[in-house]
Amino acid sequence: MKGKWGETLDAREIEQCIDTFGTDIYRFCLKLCMDKTDAEDLYQQTFLKALESKWTLDWDNNPKALFFSLAHFLWKNEKRKMARRHKIAPCSNLDEETESVLYSSVNMEEDFVQKELMIEVNRIIETLPEKVRIPLILYYLSDCSIEQIATIIKKPSGTVKSRLFKGRSLIKKRLEELGYEG
């Protein structure tokens, strides 16, 4: 996917992008940030940055990949900034406690077991190295093809396939260690 340089995108084009694939971009942001508020900020920053850029979209060559790439770039920059700040002034995080409260369930036993499995898979994904986690999120949650992921993360498609395989293997191994049957 190429973003062509030229005149800036106008509000109508951005609105069309939001209507066409905004939900996919938001879901990707949510998985990157693992926090609703941060995901909403990243989502807004992504489209704002696109509006400020000097891109013209080529609608025939899947512009969605350009927005995935931009969101990933902005997230990585924010992550680097937070790492620098954390070195200066460390702070604690209550994400795990918040997540367990959010996912508590009083439904039927099967529903409960399924939700617990999903929570465990999400926890496992959160612990995976970024180079494995990002392709998994793009492939399974954003329905990106191997080639699109390769473009977004700027790696060969063989590397993407290898990282997807490694991610699935790590998830399966950790679930088996926790007593879930494959």
Image (cartoon, grey):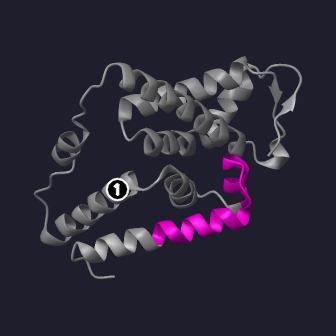
Within 10 angstroms of label 1, few (less than 14), some, or many (20 or more) residues? Answer: some
Q: Which residue of the protein is positioned furthest toward the bottom in this rendering?
A: 182
Q: Establish if 166 lies above or below 15.
A: below
In which quadrant of the rendered image does the C terminus lie? bottom left
25 and 137: which is toward the camera: 137
Residue shown at the point (45%, 74%) measured from the top left = 169
Determine the residue located farthest toward the front in the rendered image. 87
Main SS category, magenta section: helix
Query: In the structure shown, which secondary structural element does the residue marked by tag 1 occupy?
Result: helix
Kindly identify which residue carries mark 1.
122
Residue at (66%, 41%) from the top-left corner?
A: 69
Q: Position of residue 17 (x, y in %)?
A: 67, 35
Q: What range is drawn magenta here? A: 147-168
Give the number of callouts. Answer: 1
| Picture quadrant where residue 83 is located | top left
> Could you say which quadrant of the image residue 88 lies in?
top left
Q: Is 128 on the left-hand or right-hand side of 147?
A: left
> Taking 26 as reference, is 99 left or right?
left
On whether residue 156 falls in the magenta region, the answer is yes
Q: Residue furthest right?
A: 6
Residue 171 in the image, given as x and y percentages of width and height: 39, 68
Q: Amino acid at mark 1?
A: Asn
Q: Is residue 124 magenta?
A: no
Query: Can you give x and y, in whole percent of width and height, for residue 82 in the image?
Result: 43, 26
* Image coordinates for residue 90, horizontal then vertical, percent: 30, 25
Residue visible at 69% across and 33% down?
A: 16
